Amino acid sequence: MDRLHAMRVYSRVARLGSFARAADDLELSRAAVSEAVAALEKHLGARLLTRTTRRVTVTAEGADFLERCLRILAEVEAAEESVRGARARPQGSLRVDVPTAFGRGLLLPALPQFMQRYPDLKLDLRFNDRVVDLIAEQVDVAVRVGVVRQKSYVARRIATTRRVIVASPAYLATAGRPLRPEDLAGHRLLGLASGATGRPQAWRFRASRVQVAEFAVVFNLAEAQLAAALAGAGLAQTIDLLAGELIARGRLETVLDGYVGEGPPISIVYPAAARGSARLRVFADFAAGLLLRFQENLTRG
């Protein structure tokens, strides 16, 4: 049995939850996929997958083995890249998970430039505002907003942010401009759910005991929250990188500037086992450059 091949096949079946989809993805026959997984289970003396007529799920033993497989496969790929000299010309596939607002606002407009610079690199882009398990979902690299606490990940901080509270000029003309956090009690507040917990993120303020956790509307996407603020639905707390351009163009105005402070960091996150990957390195450098230039433009604006 080719154990590396079997591990690759098993990892793909576990991620896709289907032998048929894994076979199509790997360009193998379904019989070959089934045989590879069966041989691996026989070799280990353990059942890795539970099969039903509707779906395939990972067993408890299979989940632990999957995490180790992905680390080993990432190490093998990094070793192969170094031997092939791939650092000079990165190639292969890279699965990337990014926040929706970053993906649409910064990454998509710059994507042709990245593709021209690295023509042999294929991106599998996922726009997502929830916190994904990189190893379980076989994500190579993610742009993450907030503190990264997982010890099995490497987090490269690429930007800092500042919190701002914004509203449309039309809303402020009608509802008035709050001067202190206590004044928020008379306003419509637009909340944002945490990507990790699903619960609304509370608003906290410097030099004030006020904490806001009750909202007129709660959104699961930062883009939707900002769109609602633009439409005049109420006040929204966000970060400067998301709202900076709209503020500069006068479409949104900030309030309570003296009461809000540092926001969450933005980091490039990847499994520790993939540290030496050239594909990962060039994307991380590219994403960091996008954010740096955007911040510089906001400062000049």
Image (cartoon, helix red, strand yellow):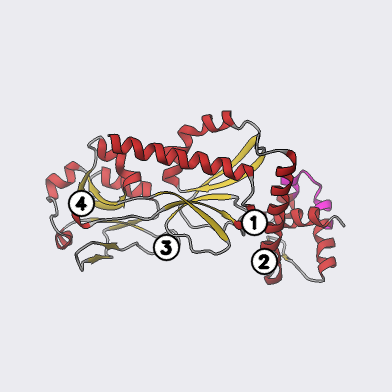
Q: What's the CA distance linking mark 2 and mark 4?
A: 47 Å
Q: Nearer the viewer, mark 3 or mark 4?
A: 4
- Which is more N-terminal, label 4 or label 2? 2
Along the viewing direction, whichever of 78 and 100 lies nearer the viewer:
78
Residue 273 - label: 1
- Which is more N-terminal, label 1 or label 3? 3
Residue 198 - label: 3
Check whether the beta carbons of the residues at disc 2 and disc 4 lie within 8 A of each other.
no
Density class for disc 3 (Cα within 10 Å; few <14, some 14-19, many ≥20) is few
Give the secondary structure at mark 4: helix
Total labels drawn: 4
Q: Is residue 270 above or below residue 209?
A: above
Q: Is residue 200 above or below residue 86?
A: below
- Which is more N-terminal, label 2 or label 1? 2
Give the secondary structure at mark 2: helix
Say which amino acid is labelled 4: Asp
Taking the spot 44% from the left edge, 46% from the top edge, the residue there is: 100
Q: Residue 80 at what x, y percent from top left?
A: 74, 45
Say which amino acid is labelled 1: Ala
Q: Mark 4 — residue?
A: 257
Say which amino acid is labelled 2: Ala
Q: Nearer the viewer, mark 2 or mark 4?
A: 4
Q: Mark 2 — residue?
A: 63
Density class for disc 4 (Cα within 10 Å; few <14, some 14-19, many ≥20) is few
Quarter of the image where one finds residue 214: bottom left
